[in-house]
Image (cartoon, rainbow, N blue to C red):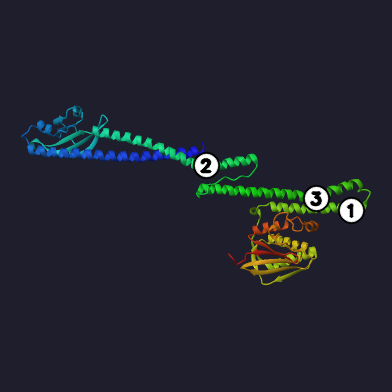
């Protein structure tokens, strides 16, 4: 069953059930009230009859006295203590009431009884009878007219319920259409996207700001993000294919050269093996960086520790000096203790120092300081710098500022993108400041150990 039909059905059924409950409460409340009123009226008439009988005493025969007070649609009778009838008078057309079994109650009774499905008001009042005997005057009055009125009330309430169900059904239909319209629009749009492969948005009413509008707005935002991610993925795959194509071509060319002349030219053999080895290392590095970038930030295994930036910087610089034989100056403006993952922070420092090494021949400077209540590790080079228009793009994957220079130095345009992923995984911040022709400063902003 479609959502529209469910809303229409459930709303209509709920409304009818509610209406039946209300009308049922009205009927039972009214019927109890009117039957109670009729019973009280019969009891009042019986009391007046008892008073009349006391005043008349034995001057008037019992039958004539009861005939004077008998209800127009009921019966009066006097029942003795042994449940026998002393006298009984019925109104014309109600002779069947005489068949009611006799019973002596010993106290006043007021109740509604049913005879042949018709409600009757029954009242029994003790009286002093002949020779001082205690008997009971029992009055029974048919409430057929009241029952008929109650049946008419039932018919009226049923008719009202059925008539009210019509606008309830129509209004629920309109409501279901209103609710399901944006959902149907999204379904159509999804099918169009699946069929055409083109990302589309749904049209939203400008005047509405309800939950349905918000759902449509969220859908459009999701489509925008999917389109953006798809475009990035396409660009990523294209760039990765391009980067892998070059070393594979070099390896294939040298392998073919080895097949033709490798056995007869030792110097060519050495050159080819060296070239193949070099390109294989480049492919390994590229593959490792691609695998790291393919991780979602939730998949990074982060172990936050209390770290002294001075000690970590000294260790990283010592390793980097040994590997690249570069001059690196360490400036400690003040001791800084931060929260970070040791291995991830080392990897981040190596990426930034490797960039400084590639794009600058001058000494590299590493600073440790506190700024804006955060620990900062700053890596400064005095190299070619980055144009102001390019700074916002350097964190994109495979992006190069100077493509010829980076190709020569072996870069893939993945280092800063990977650095940003690592920084975000540690809840750190990475920023760049650069002046073209003067150099670049990269800052790692970390939370202090005593911050919350």
The answer to whether 12 appears left or right of 203 in the picture is left
The answer to whether 13 appears left or right of 409 in the picture is left
Mark 1–mark 2 Cα distance, whole angstroms, equals 72 Å
Mark 1 / mark 2, whichever is N-terminal: 2
State the SS at label 1.
helix
Mark 2–mark 3 Cα distance, whole angstroms, equals 53 Å
Q: Nearer the viewer, residue 97 or 247?
A: 247
Q: Which residue is depicted at the point 32% across and 33% down?
A: 155
Where in the figure is residue 7, as x and y percent of width and height?
47, 40
State the SS at label 2.
helix
Image quarter in which the C terminus is found: bottom right
Where in the figure is residue 152, as x and y percent of width and height?
29, 33
Q: Which residue is depicted at the point 65% across and 54% down?
A: 297
**Residue reaching furthest to the right:** 264
Q: Nearer the viewer, residue 378 or 300?
A: 378
Query: What numbered label is drawn on residue 178?
Result: none
Where in the figure is residue 224, as x and y percent of width and height?
62, 49
Occupied quadrant, residue 438: bottom right
Where in the figure is residue 450, as x and y percent of width and height?
60, 67
Image depth: mark 2 or mark 3 in front = 2
Q: Which residue is mark 1?
A: 270
Mark 3–mark 1 Cα distance, whole angstroms, equals 20 Å
Q: Is residue 308 visible?
A: no
Local packing at callout 1 (Cα closer than 10 Å; few below 14, some 14-19, many 20+) is: few
**Residue reaching furthest to the front:** 206
Q: Which residue is mark 3?
A: 246
Query: What numbered label is drawn on residue 181?
Result: 2
State the SS at label 3.
helix
Disc 1 and disc 2 in contact, CB within 8 angstroms: no
């Amino acid at each position: 069953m479609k959502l529209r039909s469910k809303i229409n059905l459930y709303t209509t059924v709920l409304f009818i059930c509610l209406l039946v409950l209300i009308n049922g409460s009205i009927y039972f409340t009214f019927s109890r009230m009117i039957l109670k009123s009729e019973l009280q009226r019969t009891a009042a008439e019986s009391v007046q009859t008892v008073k009349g009988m006391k005043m008349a005493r034995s001057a008037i025969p019992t039958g004539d006295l009861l005939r004077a007070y008998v209800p127009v649609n009921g019966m009066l009778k006097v029942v003795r203590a042994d449940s026998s009838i002393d006298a009984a008078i019925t109104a014309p057309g109600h002779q069947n009431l005489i068949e009611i079994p006799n019973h002596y109650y010993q106290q006043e009774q007021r109740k509604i009884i049913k005879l042949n499905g018709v409600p009757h008001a029954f009242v029994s009042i003790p009286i002093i009878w002949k020779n001082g005997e205690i008997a009971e005057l029992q009055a029974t009055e048919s409430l057929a007219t009241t029952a008929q009125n109650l049946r008419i009330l039932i018919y009226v309430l049923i008719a009202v319920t059925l008539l009210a169900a019509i606008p309830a059904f129509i209004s629920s239909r309109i409501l279901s259409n209103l609710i399901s319209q944006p959902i149907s629009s999204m379904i159509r749009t999804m099918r169009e996207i699946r069929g055409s492969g083109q990302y589309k948005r749904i049209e939203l009413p400008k005047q509405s700001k309800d939950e349905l509008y918000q759902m449509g707005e969220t859908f459009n935002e999701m489509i925008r993000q999917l389109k953006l991610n798809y475009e990035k993925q396409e660009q990523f795959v294209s760039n990765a294919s391009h980067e892998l194509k070059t070393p594979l071509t070099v390896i294939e060319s040298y392998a073919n050269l080895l097949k033709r002349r490798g056995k007869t030219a030792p110097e060519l053999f050495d050159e080819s093996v060296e070239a193949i080895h070099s390109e294989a290392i480049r492919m390994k590095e590229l593959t490792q960086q691609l695998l790291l970038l393919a991780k979602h930030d939730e998949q990074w295994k982060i172990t936050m520790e209390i770290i002294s930036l001075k000690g970590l910087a000294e260790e990283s610089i010592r390793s980097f000096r040994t590997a690249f034989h570069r001059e690196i100056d360490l400036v400690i403006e003040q001791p800084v203790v931060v929260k970070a993952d040791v291995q991830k922070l080392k990897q981040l420092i190596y990426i930034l120092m490797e960039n400084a090494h590639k794009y600058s021949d001058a000494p590299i400077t590493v600073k440790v300081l506190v700024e804006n209540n955060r620990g900062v590790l700053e890596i400064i080079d005095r190299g070619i710098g980055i144009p102001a228009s390019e700074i916002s793009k350097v964190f994109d994957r495979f992006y190069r500022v100077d493509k010829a220079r980076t190709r020569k130095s072996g870069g893939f345009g993945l280092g800063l993108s990977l650095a940003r992923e690592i920084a975000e995984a540690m809840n750190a911040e990475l920023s760049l400041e650069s002046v073209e022709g003067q150099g670049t400063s990269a800052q790692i902003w970390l939370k202090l150990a005593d911050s919350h």
